[in-house]
Image: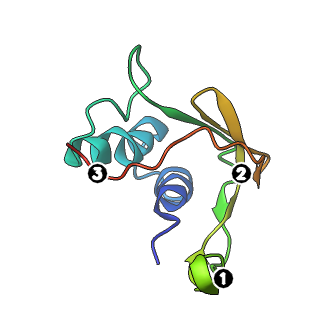
Amino acid sequence: MDADWSTFVLSYWVRDRGVYSLEEGVRRITSAPARVLGLTDRGVLAPGQRADINVIDLGELRSLQPQIVNDFPGGAPRYVQRARGYRATIVNGGVNIEDDRHTGERAGQVLRRVH
């Protein structure tokens, strides 16, 4: 399961191994995949662009063990993998995550397809 790939890039390849600078690690999990997917309005902090902002404590950043939750329709299972070290996640001006916990805010939207 690769649900923690962004946390892994920042905690392992940036912080622990020093293979990438923080800036390069962030680029690899933001603008680089956005460009591959053709999402030209995402991946950078700039006027007119869509962006989520993560405020992280790099020293505390780590993935937790995957868990199975049964929250799909009909109680179907799926894996989730949470993390520690995310102080805030801001989406469209709303704080979705604060101190590793979901606030109940749902300011984003599901991206169904790329035109």
Q: Position of residue 109 (x, y in %)?
A: 50, 44
Disc 1: CA contacts within 10 A as few (<14), some (14-19) or many (>=20): few
Which disc is residue 70 wearing?
1
Q: Is residue 70 above or below residue 83?
A: below
Q: How far, Cα to Cα, is label 2 from label 1?
A: 25 Å
How many numbered marks are there? 3
**Where residue 88 appears, x then y in whole percent?**
70, 39
**Residue for badge 3:** 113
Q: Helix, strand or loop at disc 3?
A: loop
Q: Is residue 60 left or right of residue 68?
A: right
Identify which amino acid the numbered label 1 is placed on: Asn
**Disc 2 element:** loop
Amino acid type, callout 3: Arg
Specify which label sits upstream in the sequence, 3 or 2. 2
Residue wearing tag 2: 85
Q: Earlier in the sequence, mark 3 or mark 1?
A: 1
Q: Are marks 3 and 2 in contact (CB under 8 Å)?
A: no
How far, Cα to Cα, is label 3 from label 2?
31 Å
The residue under label 2 is which amino acid type?
Gly
Query: Percent position (x, y) of residue 59?
Result: 69, 49
Do we see residue 88 in this rendering?
A: no
Image quarter for residue 50? Answer: top left
Dot 2 and dot 1 residues touching (CB under 8 Å): no
Give the residue drawn at x 40%, y 52%. Answer: 19
